[in-house]
Structures are given as structure tokens and as C-alpha cells.
Amino acid sequence: MARSTHTVTNQPPPLVGYDVFTADRALVAAVERHLDPALLDEGLGELAALGRTAGSAQVQEWGVLANEHPPRLRTHDRYGHRIDEVDFHPAWHRLLGKGVAAGLTAAWVRPGGHVRRAAGFLVWSQVDAGNGCPLSMTHAAVPALRADPELAAEWEPRLTSMVYDRELRPAGQKAGVLFGMGMTEKQGGSDVRANTTVARPLAQDGTYELTGHKWFCSAPMSDGFLVLAQAPGGLTCFLVPRVLADGTRNVFLLQRLKDKLGNRSNASSEVEFDGTWARRVGEEGRGVRTIIGMVAATRLDCVLGSAGLMRQAVAQAIHHCTYREAFGGKLIDAPLMRNVLADLALESEAATTLALRLAAAYDDGGEQERAFLRLAVPAAKYWVTKRCAPVAVEAAECLGGNGYVEESGLPRLVRESPLNSIWEGAGNVQALDVLRALQREPAALNACLTEVGKARGADHRLDGAIKNLLTELADLEGIEARARRLVERLAVVLQGSLLVRYAPPEVADAFCASRLGGDWGSAFGTLPHTLDLRSVVARAQPLS
């Protein structure tokens, strides 16, 4: 009788049944560093519980199902009535419910809320990045609504609730709500001042009727939306409820759902307004200024989301190489593979460390920290989100052909990886925003230089990079054409200064040698061989 040819050997076990938070040493260290000691035990326990949930086989399967069964648009019911609803797989609702219950929309009303939420958002993004979109926009709507104290008093308790209520009904009847956002239009994109949606004032003060379209409106099943439209006084921010107070549905005509490269569990739509009821937020003509608080918060979430994706990609790569044997030994012990894994781990830790530092600045709320955020957020959004795609692709290559197979999970990470760089203002928008801050808000540059200056003298390569950055900043010739170069240097210097102060010496040494000292090639796996790469990889292992 012929022997079976299908005995499975030399395959790693699935990376499930582990604590996603506690296994991330860089993330745990950042929380311990930035969270008030009085909150630390509670915060760490809460995040470890979320980490165990995120690492469980069941929840990982929900992430797979939510992406394998993407949302479906239903414009009409069986009788021909317009309903404009989006159907989701049950796994989507389970994931979103867990995210809300974990406080991922409640940062503004909890002590140490931004650090706790940032760590949780980074963990939860590793299950499914799609449900992060409504969680992010709901969280970010709070600072925009605070431009109108009356609106904030009405909506903020629902936005920061830890109860997920999926039913379409008046917000006043719900214990918790979700928010979306609509700024971009097909003729304008990031140039929101080119928007053509018109807002006509109604008899009741502060209410308007909207006519127009939005080219990209994510999470169209949400309870409310912040949108921009042209009022008589100029571009203005408005709140558009999905269901009106009397129970009737607002005019919110879903034209189609976007067929996206990744982020497939999340619905992104084109929407038409035709006599749509809206409430003004802030003053007429100050729409960009009003909504900018929401944009800044969602940009930080882009940084966190990319850091989460990188962490999961690196964890999967190291896990695979820990078990996989080739050429007479474990892959993780092969010097060349160890170099690749260490290089990826450096990128992941630098992203996590910078992202949590930004969250801590939100919790602080002081003038110096607000100035720091003004420059550091767009710089981090530019750089960290751009590093996500090459990290995901290289991590997939660590698995060889297995990493190109859908069941490994790496293709989903690869498809998702460019998203945060594109959404909420692509690279050039972030670079130009940094230039505006440099030109108009000198306190922002002073705050960033103060931050990096805390590490001055600790590493000669960092000192040299700071000097080169100052030289770049002093030369205004052709500043726009070299804005990307300038923003990249600012972000990497920020990362280096934080790692020199807080990371283990082997991590800081490797980062400074490669990213700041120039001893690095053009691809991952080109770190100097004299570094302690074994320790760098061991720190990033998801399972000990």
C-alpha cells in the first residue's frame, strides 16, 4: 500500500490564542511610559483583555469573514421604496461592537483616554482595519462638534458611549451612535474649497437644506455625518443626521459603494444630497477651521492604523521564521533572514513609539503639546503611513510563496497597507501642511525642536541628523519642491530621538546607524552586520 504523500511537516502553527497587546513589548513600554501611574494597573489590564480578544481564534475568524463577505448596497426595498441601506456580515457588527465596548470612541471622556485608546486602536487594527474607519471618525467628531457647545452637549455623550446600537432610528433614542465624514467631491478631492454642495438656510436658525454630492463618504451606515458645503457666508461645516428626530429618514441617497483595493469590510460610498436637512456646526465661512480638529484626530489614527498593520506583519513574519526550517536550521537563526526581520522590527517599533507619543500629547492638552501636535501629526502621518506598504510586502516575502496565498493573511495586510497614506490627505497634502505650520506657527517648530533636543548628546548620529535638519529648515530656497525630503527628515529625527531616550540600546543603535547614520541600503535586510540584531528580533517576537 502506498504511503501518504500529504504528511504535513515544517509548517508553523497559526499565530492565534495569544495576547496581541502584551506580546508587543514596544507598545507595552509606551503605555507604561505615558499613562498616569494611578491609571496604569487598570489600563494595562484593560488592554491585555482586549489583546487576548484580538488574538483569539474566534475574533481572528471574524476579521476574515468580514473581508470575505464585503458590504452590500440596497438602494430600494422589495416594494420600490428608497431605503439606502448597507448590509454587513454579522462578523462586522461583532467586531464593531467589541471596538466600541473597548472604549475606542471614548477617549475624550476617560482619564488618560488618548493613550489608552491609541494602544487599543493599534491592537484592534490588527484584527480588521476596516472597522477602524467608523471608530476613528466617531472618535474624531468630538473636537469638531465642540465648536458648537449646544450640539456638543447633545451629541457627545452618544459619541463617547461604549454601547454599539446598529439600528437606524433617531439618535435621541439610542444609547450610542457612530459618525462619518464627507468632505471630498469628484471635482476637488483634497481641494475642499472647490466643493460645490450648496447649503440653503431654512427658517429655523442654524438649519439648512443641502443639495450636492460627496465623492467619498465612508461608513454610510452611521448615525450622523460632518460635511462641508457652501453656505451664503462661505464654506461651512454641517451635521447631517441619518434619521431625523421625527423618525423619518433624511435624504441620503447612496449612489454606489466603492470597489476598493483593500479595506473591503468597510463600506465607502458616493452620496447625493437633494433637500437634505442639516444643522450648522460653527460659524458660516469657517468650515475648514471647524472640521480641522476632526481631520487632525483621524490623521493620528492613520498613524496608529499603519503602526498596527506593521506590527501584525512583523509578528507574522517573525512567527513564521521561528518555526520554519530551511538549509539545515531555523530561518530565524539565519544571519541574512535575521537582518531582514530586525530591519522590519525597527520600522515597526519606531512607528509605535512615535504614535503613542502623539497620543500622550493629546492627553496632556497643554499649549506646548498642542504646538507639538500641529507639526508632528502631519509629519508622522506622511512618513509612518508611507513605510507601511514596504513593510507589509517584505513581511509577506519572509513567508515565501505562503505569504502570497490568501489564507496566510499577508495579502490582506498588503492590500490594506497603502490606505492610510492616501486617506485623510495624501503625502503631498501632509507635506504642504507641514510647510504651512512652519511658516505661520513658529511655536510648532520650537515645540518639535524642544522634543528632539531632549535626546541631544546621547548619540552622535542623531546629533548629526538634527544639525542637518536645522540646515534644511534654514534654507527656504525651493522649499515646496523639497517638502517631502524635509518632512521625512523631521519624522525620522523625531523617531530617532524617542528611541534613543526610551528603547533598548540595541534598538536605538540599529535605528540611528541605519536611518540617521546612513549605514543602510535601499531595501530591508541591509543593516550593518556588527549590530546586535538577535536582540532586536527577540524583542519583536509575538510569542516567547
Image (cartoon, rainbow, N blue to C red):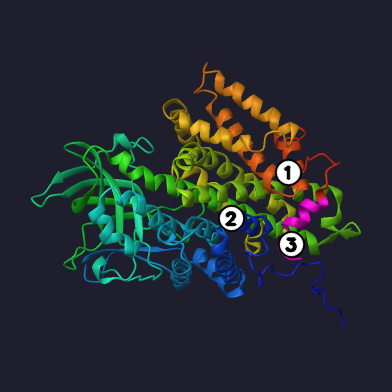
Outermost residue, front direction?
Answer: 38
Tag 1, which secondary structure?
helix
The residue to which callout 3 is attached is 319
On the image, the x and y values in percent for residue 385 come to: 56, 44
Question: Which region shows up in magenta?
Answer: 534-544
Tag 3, which secondary structure?
helix
| Pointers 1 and 3 in contact (C-beta within 8 Å) | no
Residue type pointed to by label 1 = Ala
Work out which quarter of the rendered image holds the C terminus and state it: bottom right
Q: Is residue 127 visible?
A: no
The residue to which callout 1 is attached is 508
Residue 163 part of the magenta segment: no
CA separation, marks 2 and 1?
20 Å
Tell me the number on the disc at residue 308.
2
On the image, the x and y values in percent for residue 281 come to: 25, 48
Residues 24 and 157: in front is 157
On the image, the x and y values in percent for residue 438 come to: 47, 28
Q: Is residue 43 visible?
A: yes
| Residue 471 sits in quarter | top right
Residue at 51% over, 51% down: 359
CA separation, marks 1 and 3?
23 Å
Residue type pointed to by label 2 = Gly
